[in-house]
Image (tube, rainbow, N blue to C red):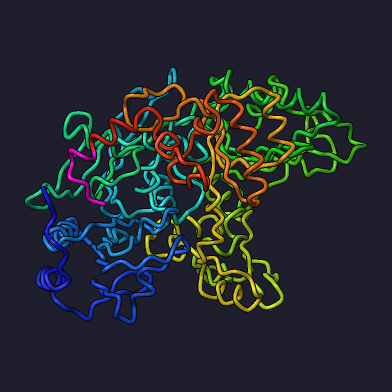
Amino acid sequence: MCSPPRSLYRLRTCLEQSFPPSDERYGYFNLPKIVYPADPDFSVAIRSPFGNSQPAVVVMAETADDVRNAVTCAAEAGYRISPRGRGHSYQALSNSNGYVVVDCSRLCKPEEFVFSHEEGDWILEGQKYIGTVYSGSGCTNAVMLAATAKEFAPEEGGLFALGACPSVGITGYLLGGGSGDVTPSTGWGSDDVLELRAVIWNGTNAEHITANKEENTDFFWASLGGGGGLGVITDIKTAIVQSPEPLPHEDRRKFLFPLLYFRYFGEEWKRAGLELLRRFLYENPKESHKFGGGGFLHSEFFVLDGIYLGSAEEFIESFGKNYLLQDFPPSTGYHTIYQKLTSEADTLEDVCDGTGPCQDWPNFHGAIIEFESYGEAMLYKLCDQVAVVMGRTQTSGDWCKDLKISPDNCVSGKYDEHFSHKLPICEKRGVLDAFLEAAYDPESFFNHGGPPEWWLDLAIKDGRVPYKDTDDLPTSLGGLLIPDVDVDTLIKISDVGTGINHFQHGAPMQFSSDYNAVAHRDTAILIEFLRGEEQRNKLLEIISEHYDDGELGFQGYYNYMNPVGNPNWRKYYFGDKYERLSETKLLRRQVR
C-alpha cells in the first residue's frame, strides 16, 4: 500500500486538531507540546550530541493516546515516524531528517509502574526471576535502577539489567540488545523483556497493540534485538532477575564494585594471563557469570572492573582458584584495598587500606568495595565514574547543588582553567541516597544526557571540536563483539590496546537463540574504537583473521556504530537473522 504524498498543511492541521494550542510546557527543557522548525524552542527540542538532523516536527507525547494521535497525523499526511526515548541513538535515529519525532520521555511515570512479585525459573541452572515491572517506554537506566531498588528489598537481590550510562533510554537500549554490568547473569536486556505495548500503523489507522510470545509474536521477536522500526513502543514488561544465593555461612547477599589489575612480567605472563581470562569467560560460566562490567586490554596488563554479584570472600575464592589474582610481595608497593558500606555505617569503612597485607588474601593489585544492595553498588559506580565525566548529564558542575545536599558532601576542584567544579564524595551514604532520588526522578538533571551548555561553551572557548559535531563522535568509528578467539589473537589485540565496554559471557550464551532477534551469542567481549582510525584499522585487521570470510564475518552490537567502511552491515548487526527480520518488517508496514 502506497503512502499518501507528503503534505505539511495536512500534518499541521491534524496536529492542531489533536493537540489544541496551549501555553503549557513540559519536561526538563520546558518545551511546548508541539515544536516546529520555525519555533524558538526547536533547537532545544532536537538537541542531541549524535547528529544534527532536521525533523519536520517534534511531538512531546504524555500518553499512549498522544502517541496514537501523532502516528495518525503523520501517516495520513505522508510522513514517517521517528520514535525517541531519550535521544541517545548513536545512529541519530532519534531525530531523522524530515520525520515526525514522537518524544516518549514523558511516558516515564515511576509512580504508575506496575510491579509483580511472581517467581519463575530463569536462564542459568538454579536461577530464578522474582518479579516483573511494567514501565513507560521513555524511562532511563537510572529510573529503572532506582525503581527496582525501592520496590525490592536489598536481601531479595532483584536485578534490572541496565547499561552503564544513567540517562540512556531503556527502549532503544533493549531493542538494540542491551548490554550492561549484570548481563552475564541476567542475559541480554532483550532477553529480559516479557511483553511490549506499541502503537503501529496498520495501513488504515493507528492501533495500540500488545506483543509477547503468544500475541503479535512476529512484532515481539523482531523488536527485541532487531533495532526497532516496527512501531512506537509505549510500555515494556521486564523480568527482575534474582542475584545468586550468598555463601552458606553468610547471612545476606553482597555486591561488589571490584577493580583488578593483572600485570605481565614478560611474554609468558602475558600469554598465561590472557589464556586464563579467556577460559574464565568462555569455559566457566558457573562462576564467571557473577562478574560483569568492562576493563582494558593493554600491552603490559589487563584491567577488570564492574559489578560482582557476591561477597568479597566469594570474589577472592572464585578469582583466586581461576588464577586471576596475582600475589605480590609487599615490597613491590602493590597492595589490596578493601572497603565496605554496611547498613549501620554512614560512609565506607576501611577493612584493608592498601598499606599492607589484606587478611589472608593474595596481595593483588586492585580494590574491592562491598555493599549490601545492588542499588548501592550501582549508584556508587555511577557516582564514581559518571560524575567525573561532566558531559554525560545535565550537571551544573556543582553536584551538591544538583543533588540538593549540603556542600560538605562535595570536594572542590577545577575542570579546566576556565571552570571550577564540585564533585560528590561517593563514599558517603547520604550522597548515594541523593543519587537514588535523582535517579528516580525522570525530570532530574541526572536523567538527561549531556553535554550541558556550559560544557559546549568551554569546548568552543578552548578551541576543541564541540561534542555535537558528528565528525568527531566517539562512536563514529564503530565497535565490535569479539568471539572466542585464540590467545595469540588476544595478545595481538592487547598489543594494540583497547577498552572493553561490556562482557556478555554466561547467561547470554546459554539463552534460547530463537526467543528474539539478538544474533551474536558466541561473543563475550564488546569493544568500541575510541582512539582513532589507526587503532580501529589495526584491530579490524587482527580480528578479521579469526573469520573464514575475513572482515565479512565481523559481529556487532546494534546500539554501536557499524565500523566505517564495513559493507556487510546486515550480518554485522543481525547475523543469520537478517532475512527473517527483513521479511517481518516488510509484512509489518514499517513505522520508523
User: Between residues 37 and 175, which one lies in front from this camera angle?
Assistant: 37
Percent coordinates x, y for residue 414 in the rendering: 70, 71
Percent coordinates x, y for residue 478 in the rendering: 53, 47
**Of helix, strand and loop, which mostly describes the magenta segment?**
loop
* Residue 346 visible in rendering: yes
Relative to 586, residue 63 above or below: below
Percent coordinates x, y for residue 333 in the rendering: 88, 41
Residue drawn 39% across and 59% down? 87
Is residue 139 a member of the stretch shown in magenta?
no
User: Which quadrant of the structure image shows residue 167?
Assistant: bottom left
Q: Seen in the image, is 219 located left or right of residue 527?
A: left
Residue drawn 37% across and 60% down? 442
Which residue reaches farthest left?
Answer: 204
User: Between residues 487 and 198, which one lies in front from this camera angle?
Assistant: 487
User: Which quadrant of the structure image shows residue 439?
Assistant: bottom left
Percent coordinates x, y for residue 416 in the rendering: 69, 72
Which residue reaches farthest right?
Answer: 331
Is residue 589 a member of the stretch shown in magenta?
yes
* Residue 245 visible in rendering: no
Relative to 441, residue 325 above or below: above
Q: Seen in the image, is 402 located left or right of residue 227?
A: right
Residue drawn 51% across and 70% down? 452
Report the number of numbered marks.
0
- The span picked out in magenta is 585-592
